[in-house]
């Protein structure tokens, strides 16, 4: 899998969250050209199945949420993705379900031995935890994933995978892989031992939250040692699978809001697109959308907004960041070996680092400077040129980066 994804939360994107039933899922078809022009090769969807509220409280995994449409709408979107060469990654919420999910009681996990109470997900009363030791639950999940893979999905993001025993996924994949050899499965892991979970579960990928945090935190704190440490751990994860990498998603404060210095947005993107993984761009981040996630009812609304009817309706001030994404994604696609590269610092201080990404005889160097003075990096740049930079073309130097600047070097 060498995809670069555009992630969309459909219930928010189509303004369907509090809406009556309607055929809204196909509004995404009108945005696929925008995604292709951005340079991505896959569409990563948030929940689209029948749910009670926000989509992560599923009541029927085999039925499209009525607020988004029906099977016909899904088939149209899947076909439109195929026509444009876009893979389609679905969001599978199989750790827990909504209270309205109809199943025998033994499908649900209890709070303890002999208890009459159902366990819930992280204190949310409306999210009832499934019993992953129950064979009928495994059969249901396998049949559900198989159903949508046969209808045109290319793979699955498995929500809250960290709360599911890894052996459950291994048992599911043993049944699915013979039928869907090219399907890709990534599990949501926020914390824990990524390598151990990948090895135990048989998943292809996990969500790289550790790298996500290190990218924005190292920029805010002017502490590239944190980023270097995270990249060392990232290299180890690559021995077990291909992480889904990101600087924003549907569950976190927007990058443009998170960064304390807006001049460092390009730095974060330069890292995302020059280190290994399957990068994912959260809709709106490519337009420098802002949004703060809050721990309250409705606290996700600001980071899951509606999009206008067409790209032409977007505000003009976001397009420079869109074009920056285009440039960096194009660089990534010209160097597909970066998907599995290993990245190490050739120079490292609190405010300046030279990150060398290599695979076989290939090499790209990402230079980052968050200091208030120019930095000339003490590295060998023989045979290298500036591939991308935030400096104007006529002001680019190979080994010197202006204050709060970044540059990417290659042959």
Image (cartoon, helix red, strand yellow):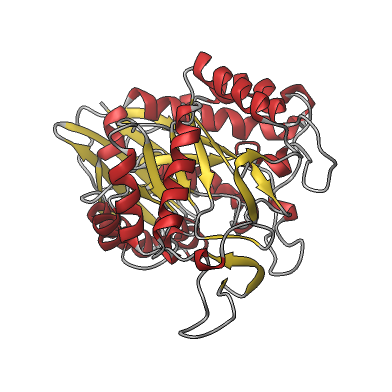
Say above or below: 204 vs 226: above
> How many numbered marks, from 0 up?
0
Say above or below: 154 vs 259: above
User: Which residue occupies the extreme front position in the image?
Assistant: 104
Could you tell me which residue is drawn at 52 percent across and 39 percent down?
90
User: Which residue occupies the extreme left position in the image?
Assistant: 360
Depth order, front residue of 226/376: 226
User: Which residue occupies the extreme top position in the image?
Assistant: 83
Say above or below: 115 vs 19: below
Say above or below: 410 vs 55: above
Could you tell me which residue is drawn at 69 percent across and 69 percent down?
295
Q: Please give left or right for residue 224 compared with residue 337 in the image.
A: right
Depth order, front residue of 357/116: 116
Quarter of the rendering containing residue 174:
top left
Q: Please give left or right for residue 246 compared with residue 306 in the image.
A: left
Question: Is residue 355 something that shows in the picture?
Answer: yes
Could you tell me which residue is drawn at 52 percent across and 13 percent down?
83
Could you tell me which residue is drawn at 32 percent across and 33 percent down?
409
User: Which residue occupies the extreme right position in the image?
Assistant: 20
Quarter of the rendering containing residue 389:
top left
Q: Quadrant of the N terminus?
A: top left
Q: Residue 374: give x, y in percent of width and height.
A: 43, 48
Q: Please give left or right for residue 123 compared with residue 302 in the image.
A: left
Q: Residue 37: give x, y in percent of width and height.
A: 56, 20
Q: Quadrant of the C terminus?
A: top left
Question: Is residue 208 something that shows in the picture?
Answer: no
Q: Residue 378: give x, y in percent of width and height.
A: 25, 48
Q: Residue 296: give x, y in percent of width and height.
A: 73, 69
């Amino acid at each position: 899998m060498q995809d670069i994804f555009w992630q969309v939360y459909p219930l928010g994107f189509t303004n369907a969250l509090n809406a009556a039933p309607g055929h809204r899922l196909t509004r995404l078809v009108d945005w696929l050209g925008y995604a292709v022009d951005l340079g991505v090769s896959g569409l990563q969807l948030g929940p689209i199945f029948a749910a009670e509220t926000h989509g992560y409280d599923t009541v029927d995994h085999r039925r499209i949420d009525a607020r988004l449409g029906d099977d016909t709408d899904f088939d149209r979107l899947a076909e439109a993705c195929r026509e444009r060469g876009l893979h389609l990654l679905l969001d599978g919420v199989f750790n827990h379900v909504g209270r309205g999910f109809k199943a025998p009681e033994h499908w649900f996990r209890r709070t303890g031995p002999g208890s009459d109470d159902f366990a819930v997900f992280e204190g949310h009363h409306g999210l009832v935890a499934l019993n992953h030791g129950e064979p009928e639950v495994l059969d249901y999940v396998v049949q559900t994933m198989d159903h949508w893979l046969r209808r045109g999905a290319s793979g699955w993001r498995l929500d809250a995978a960290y709360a599911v025993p890894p052996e459950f996924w291994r048992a599911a994949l043993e049944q699915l892989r013979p039928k869907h050899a090219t399907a890709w499965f990534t599990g949501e892991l926020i914390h824990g031992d990524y390598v151990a979970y990948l090895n135990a579960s048989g998943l292809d990928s996990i969500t790289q939250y550790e790298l996500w945090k290190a990218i924005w935190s190292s920029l805010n704190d002017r502490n590239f040692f944190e980023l270097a440490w995270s990249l060392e751990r990232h290299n180890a994860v690559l021995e077990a699978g291909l992480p889904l990498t990101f600087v924003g998603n549907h569950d976190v404060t927007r990058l443009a809001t998170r960064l304390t210095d807006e001049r460092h947005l390009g730095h974060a993107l330069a890292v995302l697109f020059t280190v290994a993984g399957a990068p994912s761009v959260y809709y709106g981040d490519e337009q420098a959308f802002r949004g703060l996630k809050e721990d309250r009812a409705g606290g996700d609304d600001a980071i899951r907004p509606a999009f206008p009817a067409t790209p032409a309706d977007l505000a003009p001030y976001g397009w420079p960041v869109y074009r920056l994404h285009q440039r960096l994604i194009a660089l990534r696609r010209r160097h597909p070996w970066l998907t599995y590269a290993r990245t190490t610092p050739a120079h490292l201080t609190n405010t300046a680092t030279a990150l060398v990404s290599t695979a076989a005889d290939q090499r790209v160097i990402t230079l980052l400077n968050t200091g208030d003075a120019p930095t000339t990096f003490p590295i060998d740049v023989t045979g290298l040129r500036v591939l991308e930079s935030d400096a104007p073309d006529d002001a680019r130097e190979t080994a010197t980066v202006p204050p709060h600047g970044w540059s990417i070097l290659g042959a």
